[in-house]
Amino acid sequence: SGFHTAAKAAGLTYFGSATDNGELTDATYKAFLSDSSVFGQITPGNSMKWDSTEPTQGQFTFTKGDVIADLAAANGQLLRGHTTVWHSQLPNWVTSGNFDNATLTGIMTNHVSKVIGHYAGEVYAWDVVNEVLNDDGTLRESVFFNTIGESYIATAFKTARAADPNAKLYINDFSIEGTGAKSTAMINLVSSLLDQGVPVDGIGIQAHLIVGSVPTTLQENWQAMADLGVEIAITELDIRMTLPATDALLKQQATDYQTVVNACLAVKGCVGITIWDWTDKFSWVPSTFSGQGAALPYDEKFAAKPAVDAILSSLGA
Ligand code: G3I
């Protein structure tokens, strides 16, 4: 059986993959991505981000995002929306506009309303805010934090709820896989938002991991997050290695994927796992980390690596 079918049988809501518009011209790629027994959920890797959806102030373009949303609907797959408020992939007019608090707040709430509103009813969950924390647990000095202050986070969530009352609203970040200062800060932040009545439904754990270096504290950390009463999801899983991919590294990678899947299965409240694309052909890793790659379960030629059977076995298939 495929990842998603096995994940459902094991009690998860979905197993999914990120994708991107340019990749869909590869017919073999698209056919496998569209197999809903393998992927019950998809996430647009780029096409719902601010630079794609509002490249010019007040002018929204949903063409590329709609392609992904329509594909998910046609395939009967859940859709994760990614992402409305993030310091990266912002158009220059946002970062260099020197807006005052009230103006930038209006710009941000308009963006969240328009984007989430456009997809209302089509999205299972939105990464409303992305990467708001620094590694030491302090809040990142994005244009939003610097201009509006910490309240931009609560404002984004309240605006998102109004725009689509049925979407689960997530805060998403990296390096919150194992316990540590950043995970503690995430737990404290979400706890404080919930205390204030801010509509946060989930914590997204990106999980861009390294072969042989998966944290040993996944389960206890994710349990602590779920204990807040929110759902958690593994939103961008990949496990990279220094190339070339040897048999030993691929075997370790398979074990590492199992560690992640097993931890999610062990935590009630962990609803799903999304890999950050499924084939090494379209991974973001090599262009960002020189000499590293082979992070996904399928290689560049779409052949299954040992991780595929390992994931299925953890899912009980
Ligand atoms: O679309 C342009 C194309 O027109 C141009 O010719 C080409 C030349 O560089 O660039 C293309 O844009 C690239 C875009 O991906 C689409 O392929 C950008 O340069 C490139 O920076 C961008 O990378 C994306 C990255 O986010 C940017 O921050 C990756 O695809 C995407 O997978 C990655 O995803 C992020 C998540 O959103 C948040 N968490 C981390 C994760 C990995 O970085």
Image: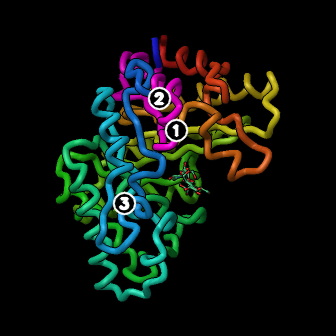
Which SS class for mark 3? helix
Is 20 inside the magenta-drawn segment? yes
Q: Which residues, given as a range, are shown in magenta?
A: 3-32
Main SS, magenta residues: helix
Residue type of the residue flagged with mark 2: Lys
Mark nearer the N terminus (1 vs 2):
1
Residue 96 sits above or below residue 62 on the image: below
Give the residue drawn at x 30%, y 78%. Answer: 105
Q: Is residue 283 left or right of residue 5?
A: right
Residue type of the residue flagged with mark 1: Glu
Residue type of the residue flagged with mark 3: Thr
Q: Nearer the viewer, residue 230 or 142?
A: 142
Residue 49 sits above or below residue 245 on the image: below
Residue wearing tag 3: 53
Percent of width and height locating residue 68: 37, 41
- Residue 23 circle label: 1
Q: Alpha carbon of mark 2 to alpha carbon of mark 3: how far?
A: 23 Å
Q: Alpha carbon of mark 1 to alpha carbon of mark 3: how far?
A: 19 Å
Residue 152 sits above or below residue 293 on the image: below
Q: Nearer the viewer, residue 160 or 226?
A: 160
Percent of width and height locating residue 2: 46, 16
- Residue 86 circle label: none
Percent of width and height locating residue 183: 52, 54
Residue wearing tag 2: 30
Mark nearer the N terminus (1 vs 3):
1
Query: How many dots with numbers?
Result: 3
| Circle 2 residues within 10 Å: few <14, some 14–19, many ≥20 | some
Q: Alpha carbon of mark 1 to alpha carbon of mark 2: how far?
A: 8 Å
Quarter, ligand 1? bottom right
